[in-house]
């Protein structure tokens, strides 16, 4: 759901928008996070092919990406940490979506 559709829904229902329920859009993130998301999407996923378990992103080539995108050296640690946070949330979401075996 987009922000616009959320606000339309609230208007149709006659309710006030709740800050915690307003969907976040890409443009809402600061530039560092937008850049980290772009870099993250270019990194290769690693999967345990025997069990179908997501193991995280493969960081091989990360330095090359940072250089290619001309990320200043002083910002690279921040980008690395943001990518780790993003991958942690994605890993959790994938694990939570996987059906639990009994």
Image (cartoon, rainbow, N blue to C red):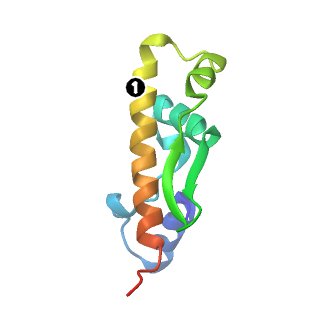
* Residue drawn at (49%, 49%) of the image: 56
Name the foreground residue: 74 vs 56: 56
* Residue drawn at (60%, 39%) of the image: 43
Where does the C terminus fall, quadrant-wise? bottom left
In this image, 88 relative to 2: left or right? left
* Residue drawn at (66%, 19%) of the image: 68
User: Looking at the picture, does residue 91 appear above or below residue 50?
Assistant: above
Q: Residue beneath label 1, please?
A: 78
Residue 65 lies in quadrant? top right
Residue 13 lies in quadrant? bottom left
What is the x, y in percent for residue 74?
42, 12
What is the x, y in percent for residue 96?
41, 70
Where does the N terminus fall, quadrant-wise? bottom right
User: Looking at the picture, does residue 17 appear above or below residue 61?
Assistant: below
In this image, 47 relative to 14: left or right? right
Q: Residues within 10 Å of mark 1 (few under 14, many from 20)?
A: some
What is the x, y in percent for residue 23?
46, 58
Name the foreground residue: 58 vs 96: 58
User: Looking at the picture, does residue 89 appear above or below residue 76?
Assistant: below
Q: How many callouts does the rendering have?
A: 1
**Helix or strand or loop: what does disc 1 sit on?**
helix
What is the x, y in percent for residue 92?
40, 60
Name the foreground residue: 75 vs 10: 75
In this image, 49 relative to 98: left or right? right
> From this viewpoint, which residue is outermost toward the front?
50
């Amino acid at each position: 759901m987009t922000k616009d559709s959320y606000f339309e829904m609230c208007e149709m229902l006659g309710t006030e928008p709740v800050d915690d329920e307003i969907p976040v859009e890409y443009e809402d993130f600061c530039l560092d996070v937008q850049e980290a998301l772009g870099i993250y999407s270019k990194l290769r996923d690693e999967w345990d092919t025997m069990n179908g378990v997501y193991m995280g992103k493969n960081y091989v080539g990360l330095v090359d990406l940072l250089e290619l995108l001309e990320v200043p050296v002083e910002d690279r640690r921040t980008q690395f940490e943001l990518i780790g946070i993003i991958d942690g949330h994605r890993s959790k979401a994938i694990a939570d979506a996987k059906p639990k075996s009994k």
